[in-house]
Image (cartoon, coloured by chain):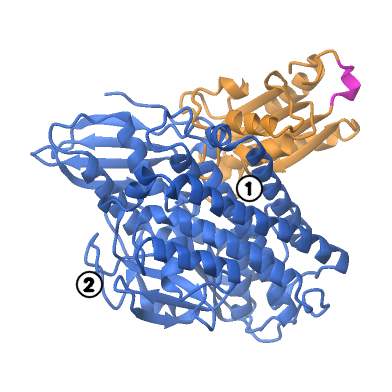
Amino acid sequence: MMAAGWPKMTMRTIVIGLGNPLLRDDSVGLRVAQSLRPLLEADKNIVVEEDYWGGLRLMEQMVGFDRAVIIDAICTAQERPGTVMRLEPNGIPTQRSASAHDVNLPTALALGRQAGAHLPPDENILLIGIEADDVLTFDENLTPAVESAIHIAVETVLDALSTKNASP
Amino acid sequence: MKRISIDPITRLEGHGKIDIFLNDEGEVANAYLQVPELRGFEQFCVGRLAEDMPNITNRICGVCPEAHHMASTKALDALFHVDPPPTAKKLRELFYSIFYATDHTTHFYALGGPDFVMGPDAPVAERNILGVIEKVGMDIAGKVLKMRRDGHHLIKMIGGRPVHPNWGLPGGVSRGITEEQRAEIETLGEDAVEFAKFSLQLFNDIVLGNTDYVDLITNEAFIHRTYNMGTVDENNHVNFYDGKIRIVGPDGVEFAKYDARDYQEYVAEHVEPWSYLKFPYLKQIGWKGFEDGVDSGVYKATPLSRLNAADGMATPLAQEEFERMYDTLGGRPVDHTLATHWARLVELLYAAERWVELATDPEITGDEFRVLPTETPTEGVGCVEAPRGTLTHHYWSDERGVLTKVNLIVGTTNNNAAINMSVKSAAEGLITKGVEIKEGLLNTIEMAYRAYDPCMACATHTLPGQMPLEVTIRTPDGEVLERFSQHLE
């Protein structure tokens, strides 16, 4: 396991925006990643990726990194659209983050660790959820409330990356 | 009434729901699988350039983007009236075989496998891939992850990007492979063959070696005698990339064999008021309801259906396993829903063998991998076997190649009627008057449904493959008696 006391500069970090670019608010994670990329490109210890999958593939993306930030749309139906939330892998309200085609993130992480992969410890994985309004319509544009949340999510990620080291 | 919350991450949002209605005697009257509706797919596509479709449709769903990419690319071949050169066809099939091996691996180990390796009655907390590793041994985690890593690496290498390839073009592909790349593909393909053999041995030892599991597979509640659909080559052997669509009846007799472009003469879609998802059926037989048998137009398009619809496998080791499966289960066709997992492993072995065959084909490194289209585009159908069933893309365009209409029949949709029937009969076998309805019930119902590896994501033209499941049991007047929610992990 990596040491929490490692110098900040050597902490390899991956920032992953998840989403479907065609399904309206589902693309917000991708949009946040696109906004972050130019802001973070000077830091060679930070990699910004856009991807599509949770579960095993998400775990596989994190292999070799010490820290991960994942940004995704979220549908709690309890928050106002555009609300930005910080979660941890085991803090997701239910563990049913499994698709019928995949396993959930905690299971995927456990699997990767059993196979000997170098993965960020749970406390170094931060999930940023942005409450979506519409994820059921094919459209490349976000709804206004979610669009206006992009800069808040960007600030949240930058804040997490800069203010905390081992525990974002 | 207890309402269980849906997982909050969008990736997980596509929410499946099973409603089971009981009659006055407390027995199962009906069972329905329902999925959310996604809106506006056709409107999204119409007015776009047809050649963009392989890169749009591969984003419909994160589960099998490669299948959509390939069906879409083939639809463009037809739309632009262009026949790709042999090297292009072989490269596409090579790519597709690698994808298949990767996808089937994930399904078996992460999803279907745990029910068997751990047993259907194992505690929920153990009935997952970690439980499998615990029981079978640690090195399996490394094997599964290596298989996935190799597959994704090669898909990216050949297809240009991870997950969503941007490689297929009307008339061929955008680039070929070098000798160095070919050699790597071959080496990793040989590893994949070994992995597939290992997986079948595991199934043999753990599942077939346990009479309880064999009894479960052969349980009448998990048997549906329907028509079977699959794509076959000129020898009536299974092919994932190209061939003719063959339909074989529950009596084992060939009912039809046709070119994919004629699909509308053979398949029609039935609509039920309670479901957004349509129910394809065999047009010449007609929709007779959710019924088994030769007189019902219900068909299945699953790994098991593909084997039932073919006369054999085109590679030697897969053919041996094909014969062993049918010998063990008492001849052809096999209608045991749970044998779909076994068929999936036979297909895994075939995909791996085909991968090596194509990687060692002298034409695979050829530099004629595209023919430029010169005809005016009109209409085109492209079809492949997606892991979850026959996938059809149908496009219409004006003379400039601007889309005027699109129609997709995706893998899981083919199986919509059969899934509902399987869910109902599993429920009937478990719920009888006076029997307490418990959590274990849910998993057994789920097993019937999971065998199809349903992907409601693109079945509703919807979200990347997620399917939390909720089961509601109702009285004849609709009052909720019980509600369960799926805990996949």
Q: Amino acid at mark 2?
A: Asp
Residue B91 drawn above or below residue B105: below
How many other residues sit within 10 Å of disc 1, few (<14), some (14-19) or many (≥20)?
many
Please tell me which residue is depicted at 78% across the width and 15% down the height of the picture: A164
- Start-end of magenta stretch: A6-11
Magenta stretch contains residue B378 = no
* Amino acid marked by disc 1: Pro
Foreground: B364 or B18?
Answer: B364
Q: Return the residue found at the far bottom.
A: B375
Tag 1 residue: A21
Whether residue B96 appears in this view of the structure is: no
Q: Report if residue A7 lies within the magenta region.
A: yes
Measured from the top left, where is residue B487 in percent x and y? 43, 31
Chain the render paints blue? B
Chain identifier of the orange chain: A
Q: Which residue is mark 2?
A: B295
- Residue found at the far top of this picture: A5
- Secondary structure, mark 1, is loop
Residue nearer the viewer, A39 or A51: A51
Residue drawn at (44%, 38%), measured in percent from left and top?
Answer: B468
Q: Is residue A158 at least partly visible in the picture?
A: yes
Q: Chain of mark 2?
A: B
Q: Position of residue B214 (x, y in %)?
A: 37, 49
Q: Which mark is residue B36?
A: none
**Residue B215 in the image, given as x and y percentages of width and height:** 32, 48
Q: Quadrant of the N terminus of chain B?
A: top left
Q: CA distance from mark 1 to mark 2?
A: 44 Å
Residue B191, position in %: x, y? 71, 55
